């Protein structure tokens, strides 16, 4: 998943095989979905309880929850007859990991450039 | 010789990432490494990938079309459109994903680049500024995710992330 996020930007990681429509970045790009995550971060909720916090239709909210579930930011658990949605903080960490991926990728590039420059220098002298 | 460290900075307001890196080589050499496909093919792709140039037209308005090729033969085409070129000083460009004919894939965010090359007493410093498209801006998304629209419950997330 971490690699997939990076792949989207840098196309270095089997992008065409592993790319999926839903990823964490896409999921949190939408303000309603961020608000849903905020609610679920406080405590697990049923779909109806979530929908009550919004003016949007239940269908619209349920679509947002579906996207959040697909990218695993939200998980669902059955409790009796009700389904409860839970916030998955671990998945959220992937957002933070992105900068680290970016950094290591660039450091790798720069090291290769160092080598190339060194070889060229040796050839000349 | 000590290793040159890259310095990374985020500017959330400007949705920009700054990268600064020194190289123990003359400005001419560093410029060439960044602007000639024979050189770029040798270092641009992070391992284990390799960049393979299909077309390089290095000038303002020109483009670099290349593939990132993986160890299993998988590849992804990319193009860099050069906007401005100030010889051996700076260049600006946009980087996008595309097919092998260079048709841009708009499903993916574009990145905007500004590279400034400066000679120093010991070599060359390259300053890189990377800006993202508004809607696809990863940094803005990071910012939104952590700072906007999140209630008290998510304040714990920062601590969680620190520990994780």
Image: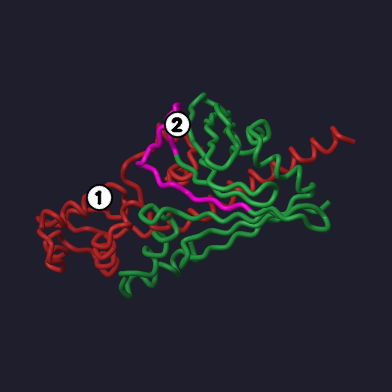
Chain colours: A red, B green
Q: Is residue B58 left or right of residue B117?
A: left
* Residue A67, numbered circle: 1
Q: Dot 2 surroundings within 10 Å: few (below 14), some, or many (20 or more)?
A: some
Q: Residue at x 53, y 58 (%)?
A: B17
Q: Is residue B108 left or right of residue B85?
A: left
Q: Nearer the viewer, mark 1 or mark 2?
A: 2
Quarter of the image for residue B58 reads top right
Q: Main secondary structure of the magenta part?
A: loop
Image coordinates for residue A31, horizontal then vertical, percent: 27, 62
Tell me how far mark 1 sits from mark 2, CA to CA.
31 Å
Q: Residue at x 54, y 37 (%)?
A: B62
In the displayed structure, A98 sits above or below A19; it is: below
Q: Residue at x 18, y 51 (%)?
A: A63
Q: Are marks 1 and 2 in contact (CB under 8 Å)?
A: no
Quadrant where the N terminus of chain A is found in the figure: top left
- The segment highlighted magenta reads B97-115
Q: Nearer the viewer, residue B133 or B152?
A: B133
Q: Which residue is mark 2?
A: B102
Q: Dot 1 surroundings within 10 Å: few (below 14), some, or many (20 or more)?
A: many
The residue furthest top is B73
Q: Nearer the viewer, residue B110 or A23?
A: B110
């Amino acid at each position: 998943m971490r690699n997939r996020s990076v792949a989207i930007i840098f196309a270095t990681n089997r992008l065409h095989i592993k790319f999926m429509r839903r990823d964490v970045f896409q999921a949190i790009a939408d303000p309603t979905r961020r608000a849903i995550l905020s609610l679920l971060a406080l405590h697990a909720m049923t779909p109806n309880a979530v929908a009550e916090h919004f003016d949007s239709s239940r269908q619209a909210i349920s679509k947002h929850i579906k996207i959040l579930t697909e990218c695993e930011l939200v998980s669902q658990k059955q409790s009796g007859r009700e389904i409860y949605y839970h916030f998955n903080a671990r998945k959220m960490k992937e957002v933070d990991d992105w900068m680290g991926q970016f950094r290591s990728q660039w450091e790798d590039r720069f090291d290769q450039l160092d080598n190339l420059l060194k070889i060229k220098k040796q050839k000349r002298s | 010789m000590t290793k040159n460290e890259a310095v990374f900075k985020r500017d959330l307001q400007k949705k920009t990432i700054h990268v600064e890196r020194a190289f123990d080589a003359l400005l001419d050499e560093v410029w060439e490494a960044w602007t000639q496909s024979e050189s770029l093919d040798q270092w641009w792709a992070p391992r284990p990938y390799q960049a393979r140039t299909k077309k390089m037209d290095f000038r303002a308005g020109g483009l670099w079309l290349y593939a990132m090729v993986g160890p299993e033969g998988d590849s992804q085409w990319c193009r860099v459109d050069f906007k401005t070129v100030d010889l051996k000083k700076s260049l600006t460009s946009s980087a996008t994903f595309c097919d092998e004919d260079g048709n841009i894939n708009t499903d993916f965010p574009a990145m905007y680049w500004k590279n400034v090359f400066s000679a120093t007493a010991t070599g060359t410093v390259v300053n890189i500024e990377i800006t993202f498209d508004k809607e696809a801006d990863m940094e803005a998304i990071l910012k939104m995710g952590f700072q906007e629209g999140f209630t008290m419950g998510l304040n714990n997330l920062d601590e969680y992330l620190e520990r994780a």
